[in-house]
Amino acid sequence: MASKGTIDMQALGKRLKLARVVRDLTLQQLSALSGVGVGQISRLENGEKPGVRVDTLAALATPLEVSLDHLVGREEPVSAGKRSVPAPTKRARTRTTATRG
């Protein structure tokens, strides 16, 4: 892990990609949901960016349903056999009926 106060960008990239794959999202879908460019997400996942802004991480964390602490590696490791990112759940759709008039 990187020294205190710095982020290991390689590890962040791996956690970011894992969260995206577990959520079954493409780079394009995550980009559309987060407002972060496809190229920037790709460079983050591959550890090619020297740093990242907190607002960018927050924008990515929200659709991935993970915490900022998870992305930067500040959470405790999950015990063996458990997934660090919960499985996606389907949301119940509410139906509205058209009014007849």
Image (cartoon, rainbow, N blue to C red):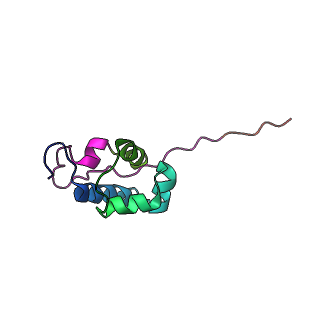
Give the quarter of the image for residue 48: bottom left
**In what quadrant of the picture does the C terminus appear?**
top right
| Residue 24 in view, yes or no | no
**Would residue 42 be counted in the magenta stretch?**
no
Q: Position of residue 52 (x, y in %)?
A: 33, 50
Number of numbered labels in the structure image:
0
- Residue pictured at 19% horizontal, 55% vertical: 81
Q: Look at 28% across and 48% down and name the residue there.
A: 71
**Magenta segment includes 87:** yes
Q: Position of residue 42 (x, y in %)?
A: 38, 63
Residue drawn at x 27%, y 60% is 14
Q: Residue furthest front?
A: 50
> Nearest the camera: 66 or 79?
66
Chief SS of the magenta region:
loop
Residue closer to the observer: 15 or 84 = 15
Q: Inspect this view and state whether residue 27 appears.
A: yes
Q: Is residue 6 left or right of residue 55?
A: left
* Range covered by the magenta-colored residues: 67-95
Q: Quadrant of residue 97?
A: top right
User: Residue 28: where, in percent of width, then height?
Assistant: 49, 61
Q: Residue 76: x percent and y percent?
A: 17, 44
Relative to 89, 69 lies left or right = left
